[in-house]
Image (spheres, helix red, strand yellow):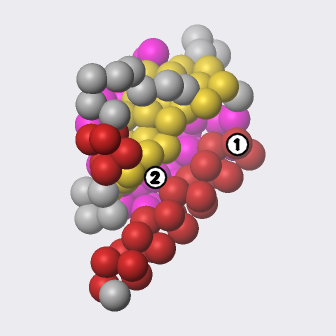
Amino acid sequence: MLEDIETLQQRTVMVRIEEMIQSTPDYAEIREALQSLEFIPEQDETDFAIWVQPDLRIFVLLRMNLGGGYAGYKVAAYEEIERREGTSAGYNAR
């Protein structure tokens, strides 16, 4: 039962992040929102960013444009990546 609640919370946050990314073209705003949701930047480079939320086991990958926006993104649970080991993670084109 507890696992079901954690999974529901994880999925809810993932949907919220997807909606935020799709409606917010400015990376600075996305960065602020991720920080407010207790995400930790693993890498925050000019061409890509990786943010993780260890408690909810979520990661966010953003591929950047030169103008400060982003070219693509991926929001996933750790489990999804672990199942795909050996394959490359794709981007959701914007």
Residue 85: image location, x then y, percent: 27, 31
Q: Is residue 35 visible?
A: yes
**Percent x, y of residue 92:** 61, 30
Write down the quadrant of residue 35 in the picture.
Answer: bottom left
89 is higher (above) or lower (below) than 36: above
Q: Quadrant of the N terminus?
A: bottom left
> How many residues crowd around disc 1 within 10 Å: few (fewer than 14), some, or many (20 or more)?
few
Residue at 55% across, 39% down: 28
Q: Residue 72 vs residue 63: left or right?
A: right
Q: CA distance from mark 1 to mark 2?
A: 14 Å
Work out whether mark 1 precedes mark 2 in sequence or the reverse, and give the earlier one: 1
Amino acid carrying label 2: it is: Leu
Q: Nearer the viewer, residue 22 or 35?
A: 22
Does the segment drawn in magenta span residue 41? yes
Give the extent of the magenta segment: 24-47
Lateral position of residue 54 relative to residue 73, left or right:
left
Q: Position of residue 41 (x, y in %)?
A: 31, 41
Disc 1 residue type? Gln
Q: Could you say which quadrant of the image residue 49 lies in? A: top left
**Residue nearest the observer in this picture, 85 or 66:** 85
Number of numbered discs? 2
Query: Is label 1 in a helix, a strand or a loop?
Result: helix
Residue on which disc 2 sits: 34
The answer to whether residue 7 is left or right of residue 13 is: left
Q: Position of residue 9 (x, y in %)?
A: 45, 73
To which residue does mark 1 refer? 22
Q: Residue sitting at 50 percent across and 25 percent down?
A: 90
Residue at (31% x, 50% y) in the render: 79
